[in-house]
Amino acid sequence: MSKSKNKLFTVVYELAQEGGYVAYAPGLPGCNTQGDTIEKAEKNITEAIELYLQEIADTKEVEQSKCSPLIGSVLVHA
C-alpha cells in the first residue's frame, strides 16, 4: 500500500473576460483550468494538479522545484 502525502501548491485565480474564473498553478507549467464560479475553478484546479502530478510520476519526469513562486503587490502612484 502506498502512502499518499499532502502537498500545498500556490494557485492564482483571475476573472475571465468571458465570465467565470481562470485558475493556474504557477509552479506547474501548463497546469491551468477554468470554472463558472470560484468554487468550481478551485475544484477543477485541484483535479488538474492531481492529474499533472500523476503524469509526472508515470513518465518519471523531474518533480517541480521545491520553491514556490513569490506573489506580492506593489503600490503605484498613477
Image (cartoon, rainbow, N blue to C red):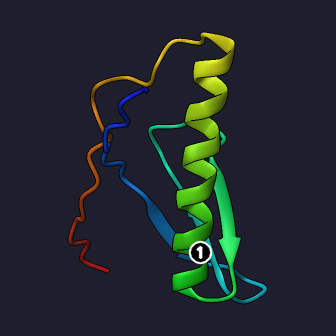
**Is 28 located above or below residue 12 in the figure?**
above
**What residue type is disc 1 on?**
Ala
Q: Is residue 64 left or right of residue 31?
A: left
Res. 29 visible in picture? no
Q: Residue furthest front?
A: 1
The residue positioned 52% from the left and 84% from the top of the image is: 39
Which quadrant of the structure image shows residue 54?
Answer: top right
The quadrant in which the C terminus is found is bottom left
**Is 7 located above or below residue 40 in the figure?**
above
Please give the count of numbered marks on the rendered protein: 1
- Residue assigned mark 1: 41
Which quadrant of the structure image shows residue 60?
Answer: top right
**For this rendering, which residue is in front, 69 or 53?**
53
Please state the horizontal and vertical placement of residue 27, each as a whole percent of the image: 44, 38
Please state the horizontal and vertical placement of residue 42, each as a whole percent of the image: 51, 72
**For this rendering, which residue is in front, 53 or 76?**
53
The quadrant in which the N terminus is found is top left
The kind of secondary structure element at disc 1 is helix
Q: Residue furthest right?
A: 18
The residue positioned 24% from the left and 77% from the top of the image is: 77
Please state the horizontal and vertical placement of residue 33, each as a whole percent of the image: 68, 62
**Is 39 located above or below residue 62 in the figure?**
below
Q: Is residue 7 left or right of residue 27?
A: left
Q: Report crowding for label 1: few under 14, some 14 to 19, many 20 or more residues within 10 A (C-alpha).
A: many
Res. 1 visible in picture? yes
The residue positioned 63% from the left and 66% from the top of the image is: 44
The residue positioned 35% from the left and 31% from the top of the image is: 3
Which quadrant of the structure image shows residue 16?
Answer: bottom right
